Each structure stands twice: as C-alpha cells, then as structure tokens.
Amino acid sequence: MTRRIILPALIASSAMLAACQPMAARKGATAAPRAAQPAQAAQETAAQARTAAPAVEFRLAQDKPGADLRELRMPDKTYYFLLAPALTRADLNAATPMKTREGQPFVSLRFTPPGAQKLARIGRQYSGKWLVFTIDGKLVGVPRIAGPMDEGILNLTMNSEEQAISVAQAILGEAQ
C-alpha cells in the first residue's frame, strides 16, 4: 500500500523539480565553470570562499517558550529558538537561485554528506517545527520543517528573484 502512495509522490516531486529553472545571476556577475578547473584548484577556491563568506546558520525553533530558548517576535507569530545552530555554512555544498514553473523564486540548498545526514535527522525528529535561517545574524526566513528531508536538499521560498539571487550569492560568499 505504501509503495502505491510513495511512488506517485516521488514521480510528482521529480517532475516538479525538473520544471524548476535556475535563475541567471544579475549585476554583471560571472563565474567560470567549475568543470573547467582542476579538482584541487576548485577545492581551494571553495575553501577560500567559505573562510571569507558570511555566517550562515539554521537554528531549531518552536512556537512554545522553553528553557534555553531565545524569543523571535514576528508580526504574525512568535518563535522560540535554540541559540546553537543545528546547521551551518560548513554543512552546505551549493546554493542555487531558482524559480518554479509558476514563477515562484526559491533557493535550492544542497548539503554535504554530513550536512545531509543532519538535515535528514532534523526532518525526522522535528517535523512541524521551524528553522530560523540567518546570514551574518540577519533573519532570512523561518521555514517550517514539513517532514523527512532525505535527499540532502532544502528548497527555501523567497519573496523575489532578486532576494533568491542575493541569498544564494551571500551563502556562496560572492560579492553582491
């Protein structure tokens, strides 16, 4: 019975992701294709970008106060989050600004293998809770954890194409 449910859901989600289109970076940003670089040079470039890049953090949050939780008041809701991040920039492999077939912009985050394991555990253990997403201490969003995230990918809806591009560039440590 579960195969009958899971297989169509898997096919539908694959079709939706296939329809997603990457957004072109704006403001004259250019990037050399990674495939053209030797593997070692690409690793060194990524390591340099990570050390110079802003702090990217995801903190677990809930809607009830508790011990050792900090308060985050939003116009429509108050969240209570852990001070220690559950995921950081070190857990990320890639950030790509994209948009759905309907034109909704989002950032697709691909995690490293250890980061993907953390993300999967978070999805299983904290379904229905939230992640407070910050870059250099500035709030970017508070996505709800919908359930298991076993693919090592987290797609975050953005308000505009410009925001999606800006967030991806900040995560990658690129000049904006």
Image (tube, grey):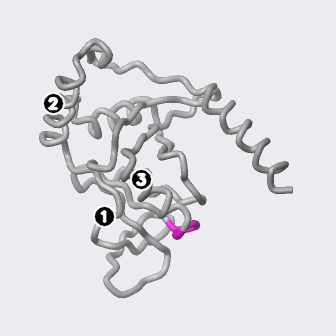
Other residues around mark 1 within 10 Å, as few (<14) / some (14–19) / many (≥20)? some
Quadrant housing residue 118: bottom left
Taking the view exactly as shown, the residue that stands out farthest to the bottom is 67
| Image quadrant where one finds the C terminus | top left
Local secondary structure at mark 1: loop
N-term-proximal mark, 3 vs 2? 2
Amino acid at circle 3: Gly
Other residues around mark 2 within 10 Å, as few (<14) / some (14–19) / many (≥20)? few
Q: Tell me the distance, in whole angstroms, between the alpha carbons under discs 2 and 1.
A: 26 Å
Residue 156 visible in the snapshot: no
Relative to 76, 172 lies left or right:
left
Q: Tell me the distance, in whole angstroms, between the alpha carbons under discs 3 and 1.
A: 14 Å
- Which of 116 and 60 lies nearest the eye of the viewer? 116
Q: Nearer the viewer, mark 3 or mark 2?
A: 2
Q: Residue at x 42, y 41 (%)?
A: 109
Give, as a single range, the part of the protein colored magenta: 125-129
The numbered disc on residue 85 is 1
Q: Circle 2 is placed at which residue position? A: 44
Q: Circle 3 is placed at which residue position? A: 141
Residue 9 located within the stretch drawn in magenta: no
Q: Tell me the distance, in whole angstroms, between the alpha carbons under discs 3 and 2.
A: 30 Å
Q: Residue at x 34, y 39 (%)?
A: 93
